[in-house]
Every structure is written in C-alpha cells, then in structure tokens.
Amino acid sequence: MSNLIGSAGGEPNLSSAAYQSICEFLDQNCGIVLGNSKQYLAKSRLLPLLVKFELADFNELAQALQSAAFSSAKLKSAVIDAMTTNETYWFRDDKQFSDFKDRVLPELLNQKNGSLRIWSAACSTGQEPYSLSICALEVLRGTGKNRNIQIIGTDISETVLADAKRAVYSELALSRGVDSATQARYFQKSYEGYTLNDDVRQLVRFQQFNLLKSFAALGRFDVIFCRNVLIYFSDAVKRDIIGRMAENLETGGYLFLSSTESMPTGLGAFEPVRNGQSTYFKKRG
C-alpha cells in the first residue's frame, strides 16, 4: 500500500492539473461545478480515498477517473459520494412544508382522482421524502380518506440512499427539525437510534439516479421537490434540469426550489405562487 508521502514529507499535494482533471470528471458525470477556489475542499474530502484505493497521490487518482476500465467504477462512485454535499434535516424550510401540507396537497387531492406522485430529487439520507410522507399522512388523517400517494426519493449517492432505506436516525439528526410530538408519533426508540415507523416508510421508495440523465423512466409527477442541489450546477445545466422536470410534471403540478434559489429567466412553463407562506412554482396549463 502506498504510504502517501508528499513531496515535502507530509500529505500528497493536489496539483493544479490533477484538480482540473477532477473538476472535469465531476462536471461531466454529475454536473457539480467546483470552480477555481475549492482545491482545499477537494483535497480534504478525497484524501481518505487515496488510502482506501491504494493510490500513490492525487495524480494517480485523476488518471483513474479518466480510465474506462471497469475496475475504476467503484472509485468513481466513491469520488462522487465524497464530493456531494449531503447536508439535510427534517422539514427543512418549514414554511414550504406548511404550504405543501395546508395548500398544495389538499388542492391536488380534491382535483385529481387516483394516485398522486411526488419526487424528492437529491434526497440524501431521506429526511425530505420522509417529511413529505409525514405531511401526507397527516393530511389523509384529517380528511379520513384513503388515497394512494407515492413518494420517490432519488440521489446520485448509493451510500446516502442506503442510510435512507434503513430509516434509523440518531438523536442529533432528529433534533434538527423534529419536535417531541412528531417524534413520539412517528419514531420508535431502538438500540441503533430512532427507527421511523412503517406507515411513513411505506409511502416512500428510493432509487439511485443522476439528474444529468433522462427523466423518462421516472414517470410523471404531481409535485417535485428539487431543493439545495441546483446551486452546484452551471446555469446551463440548471436550466436543462428544470426544463426537463417541467416535461415530467403534470399540468397544474408544483415545483419547489429552495427559498434561496430563483427560477432561471425564460422558463415559461412555470408561474410563481406566493399566496402562502413561501414561494414555489406551478406548471402552467
């Protein structure tokens, strides 16, 4: 195994050429644009992979990322995992969840017969789709109706999806957005942490998915949550993703971006909705 000794006897250096190669790999494979000021971030996140994959330095890692060999597939996946930000918490941006629960979901349930389909894009370890599921259960409980609601959570990282499918969270994770009443109703204490109840889990399924790929296989949706991920993409990629989401969204359906994101100009498929506590977007008829 490589001893990972750099030119000065310490950690390996991340050369400009290696960094540029890594940036190109991320841009082409998952749309992440690092720019010229994130070398320290890339080095700190990727350094453990040099040990794990027995690579001598970052130059060797960069070369492996350009390889078409099947043996490099696990490394490529690990690099994407390491460089994907997975910051998330329950009911993040609670005003949007309030509008989803109090306005959007009741409206769609009243207007549409049959199943409702919701997509949580870049769902990380599952807090967003499970928060949507809790909202759906509470709306259905309030109406006394039994309707089929399907929530699809996707992420490029298989690592975070494995955690999402387990649906076991630490006390610290629950403290980020879950109040005591919600915890008591929807979680069970276990030796591993807090396990989410089956009634919440059964509305949600998870799938590994790259937003740069075609959305055709995902089907059509009534609501799409795509929050805190487009900020990592170039403007062109952002416009492309939202444009393709519009094609997979039913007429009158809703798109939620994060409260800090704006709709790119010139995308006429959506109109903003501001009559609730937050801003979100409705697909035009």
Image (cartoon, rainbow, N blue to C red):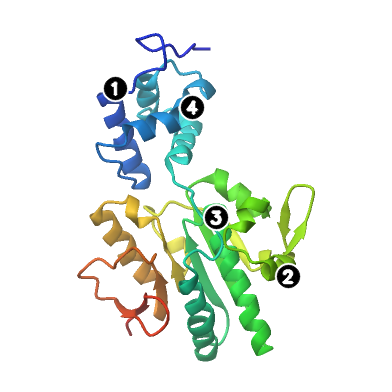
- Does residue 8 sit above or below 190 in this rendering? above
Q: Position of residue 126 (x, y in %)?
A: 57, 57
Report helix, strand or loop for mark 4: helix
- Name the residue beneath numbered marker 4: 49
Query: Which of the two discs, 3 and 4, labels the residue nearer the N terminus?
Result: 4
Quick check: can you spot residue 91? yes
- Name the residue beneath numbered marker 1: 15
Query: Which of the two discs, 1 and 3, labels the residue nearer the N terminus?
Result: 1
Q: Which mark is residue 169?
A: none
Q: Which mark is residue 185?
A: 2
Comparing 123 with 92, the one in front is: 92
The amino acid at mark 2 is: Arg
Distance from the alpha carbon under mark 1 to that under mark 3? 35 Å
Report helix, strand or loop for mark 2: helix
Quick check: can you spot residue 146? no
Image-quadrant location for residue 178: bottom right
